[in-house]
Image: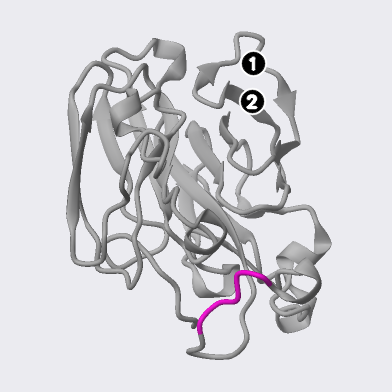
Amino acid sequence: MAEVWGYNGSTPGPTAIAHDGERVRFVVQNDLPEPTTVHFHGAHAPNEADGVPGVSQLKPIPPGGSYVYEFTPGHAGTFAYHSHTNSATQELKGLDGFFIVLPRREAARDRVDRDYAFVLQSWFFQGDGQPVVVFPPGGDFNFHTMNGKTRDAASEMRVRVGEKIRVRFYNASQLVHSMHQHGFDLTIESQNGHERVDRPVVTTVDEGPGNFHEVVFTPDKPGRWLVHCHFPHHTSNAMQEGPEGSPVGMARVFDVVAR
């Protein structure tokens, strides 16, 4: 456990979901000890809702103050929201979350049985209950998480053979993460909020900072199958592996059971 910042008491913050063409309103109450703003990354918000202090938003939200962002997203897709004030500190302390805009109608080939969304984050922990360090010594982050948890602290995801699974990745860190699924190929549906018409089939998806991917797969055999970052240091906690040398950092397990 470490001290972080978050939205509504968690990092990542709650997943915001809207439908294409809907007008959305975000009411932000700043309970931080410093000013902040919110930027809607990739959602093509109008300039007055872009959330950049001193540029599109004249003044940030002061401590104890509030602000309303209201707009209609530019199009459907997987996006994010995050602080854009003192970003090197506030984003790396955990001020980010998913903003998913669903299409009004979904083509038959795009329908799935299960839909998972993972925010990829990297931290420097200095001790249990201590604040995370946003400028770590040598720039080395020693903890890497999916949705704020390492594999050993998260529940496994039970799915069935033959189900179509969608996984959404958003890289909220300042490192590249190479996300690899064991046992099954991944088909890239969209990248950074735009459909990939070519639908490439891959085993690993490289997520640069601020990037999004939507991938799908259909498991054809049972088992406990790992999805993880393929940078070896990113599947350890403080350079320590789990029991029997198992990965414990930026990883999850799909528990695939027979129908």
Q: CA distance from mark 2 to mark 1?
A: 6 Å
Residue at the image point whose x is 45% and y is 44% from the top: 116
Q: Residues within 10 Å of mark 1 (few under 14, many from 20)?
A: some
* 230 relative to 7 in the view: left or right: right
Q: Which SS class for mark 1?
A: loop
Q: Examine the residues drawn in magenta and state their main secondary structure.
A: loop
Residue at point 63%, 42% (across, down):
221
Position of residue 178 relative to residue 17, above or below, is below
Q: How many marks?
A: 2
Report x, y in % for residue 30. Answer: 25, 61
Decide: few, some or many residues near mark 2? Use Cα within 10 Å; few <14, some 14-19, many ≥20: many
Which disc, if any, is residue 180? none
Query: Which of marks 1 and 2 precedes in the sequence?
Result: 2
User: Magenta segment: does it hold 129?
Assistant: no
Q: Position of residue 180 (x, y in %)?
A: 72, 45
Look at label 1 and name its amino acid: Arg
Residues at marks 2 and 1 touching, judged by CB atoms closer than 8 Å: yes
> Residue tagged by mark 1?
199
Q: Secondary structure at mark 2?
A: strand
Is residue 134 magenta-colored? yes
Residue 248, image x and y in percent? 66, 71
The part of the image, by quadrant, that contains residue 205 is top right
Residue hosting label 2:
187
Residue at image point 35% right, 67% down: 34
| Amino acid type assigned to the residue bearing label 2 in the image | Thr
Task: Using the image as rendered, state which of residue 116 and residue 132 is in the foreground.
Answer: 132
Residue 220 in which image quadrant: top right
The magenta segment? 131-135
Q: Is residue 198 visible?
A: yes
Q: Does residue 181 show up? A: no
